[in-house]
Amino acid sequence: MHMQQQAAGTVLPGVAIWSAAKKAGAAAALALLAALMLNLGMPGIGEYSGWWPLLCICLSPLLLIALNLPLRPLQAAGAGFLFGLAAYSGQLYWIVIVLGRYGGLPLWLSVPALLLLATYMALYSALFCLLLSWLRQGVEERTNPGYLGFIHIWAPPLIWTGLDALRGLLFTGFPWMDLGYGLFREPQLLLPADLGGHHLLSFCLVLINAVFALALSALSLRRPLWKAVLPALAAACSLLIGLSVYSLLRSVETKEEIAAAPKVLIGVVQGNIEQDLKWSEAMKQATVERYLRLSAGLAAEGAALVVWPETALPFYPQDDPLAGRVAAFAGAETGTRVLTGAPFYRIEDTEKGKLIHNFNGALILGTQGKVDGVYSKQHLVPFGEYIPLKDLLFFLKPLAAGIGDFSVGRNKGPLFSDRLRAGVLICYESIFPVIARDTTALEANMLVNITNDAWYGHSSAPVQSLAMAVLRAVENRRALVRSANTGISGFVDPLGRISGETAIFTEAAAAESIPLLQSKTVFTRVGHYFGLFCALLILPLLVAGLLRSPGRDTKAPLSGARSAKKAGRP
């Protein structure tokens, strides 16, 4: 009898291994399912925009892993890492094109570079699952229902959004395609961004995912769950309904504001200059002539300003006589202002001699053919416009060789020309909300995004780049004009509606009348801190987890396992 009891209480090693393998397999399958749905919901595979409704459920498998599977926190973190590696490899596959075709790196270096970046991004999803799994441990529905509801409904969006905000700051920041950007083609869903930015949109999407995951987990329970989480669930529904009402009201008010605002006809030119030829000496004059030819029709339409892409002038206008040709077009020939991207330099006298600073910049030529203002790029692209840790990463220097090693600009204000106050975002800067926010706070009445997306080839990156620019318009309630060398160019109104969208790798010229708004949004004033506020709240959340009552079962998830054990069921 004693031996039978001992045998009954013993878990055979083979059974334990099989059980662990099943848990690991289920977690891996759920993680990969989440990554697949995210990539199908976001612009991430090919040149398409994704099916955004998937963003409302794509993280649910990840939440089931962290909050429901009987896994320890480190095991949940492993599943989160797998999710991140698969998801961000799909989102960022174009890195191989940039580094390989245009950076000159062989495949055996460009593919590991993609995986290295995806690995870094995956650390955040791993930490997300780790924190949720750790907070979930020992949750008692009957003794602490408020904590249960908070962990399952409110902790996921809080932690996810906070980690997104940190990723946008750490190591110069790489906030590429946060979840909220996937809504960029749905203007009716974008308007809460003028309160808390794209981070608020991400917060709401993760909140919806959390409610959906909770519903899925409730289906597998043997006892009622909703009573325990009802307050947290009611608060979540109230927030989502409140933001929906706000969107309806804000849409009406903004349309009225647009109708009453002064308008100005703005033109954009997409020159479609091949990246391989862009910086060749022989191509300089042909490039300028192409832009002037495409701009002439816009000037004839009465455009007050024509916008050319990033480094549309592939030379230093301070030294090259071709700059005079552009000045003549803006002055005596047409009287149409030209805002163009161009490199320029500044010479500084130091104790060791003259030091030359090169800048990736933009300048606006007024109706007299003179420069009305110059802007230098504030946030440079690592490994594209400068090489961090040059001595250690010497083999990556070819990436910056084509356009030079640039210095960081310091001017945050808009470019002024008559009544136009253009807040300029050069390429990569459009993914950083604070840059557009700063220039709007300094009285920009329109935003201009100039870029050269030729580096990305035929990939999803041009769509992704457009998606992030759209949110800059909505957050600050400013019209945005976008000119890209090879596309996508177009116009975005303060409600996030896209018009005049061009195809990639084609020549194009278009003009549209845009409103010049003056009002400042909640986001422009204080809302840009929303993501950081979420990040700061992670700390007290962890403290609350540390203060949980001791002696709880740290392995049983929200699955009814604890009540089944007490009832004597196997």
Image (cartoon, grey):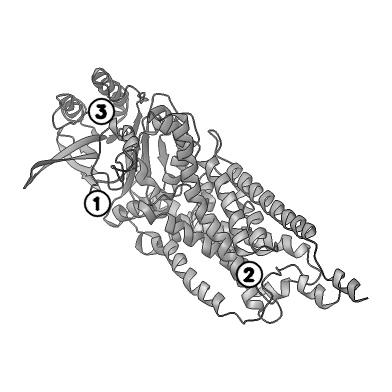
Q: Nearer the viewer, residue 298 or 456?
A: 456
From the image, tell me which residue sits under label 3. Answer: 314
Residue located 56% across and 52% down the image = 81
Quadrant of the rendered image containing residue 284 = top left
Question: Are dots 2 and 1 in contact, CB under 8 Å?
Answer: no
- Alpha-carbon span between mark 1 and mark 3: 24 Å
Sequence-first disc among 2 and 1: 2
Residue 236 appears at what percent x and percent y?
A: 60, 67
Quadrant of the rendered image containing residue 341 = top left
Sequence-first disc among 3 and 2: 2
| 217 over 422 or under it: above or below | below
Residue 467 appears at what percent x and percent y?
A: 47, 43
In this orientation, does residue 253 appear? Answer: no
Q: Amino acid at mark 2?
A: Arg
- Alpha-carbon span between mark 2 and mark 1: 46 Å
- Answer left or right for 276 relative to 442: right
Quadrant of the rendered image containing residue 375 = top left
Q: Amino acid at mark 1?
A: Gly
Q: Nearer the viewer, residue 182 or 304?
A: 182
Residue 318 appears at what percent x and percent y?
A: 14, 32
Question: Are dots 1 and 3 in contact, CB under 8 Å?
Answer: no
> Is label 1 in a helix, a strand or a loop?
loop
Q: Quadrant of the N terminus?
A: bottom right
From the image, tell me which residue sits under label 1. Answer: 413
Residue located 63% across and 48% down the image = 54
From the image, tell me which residue sits under label 2. Answer: 136
Q: Nearer the viewer, residue 203 or 26?
A: 26
> Is label 3 in a helix, a strand or a loop?
loop
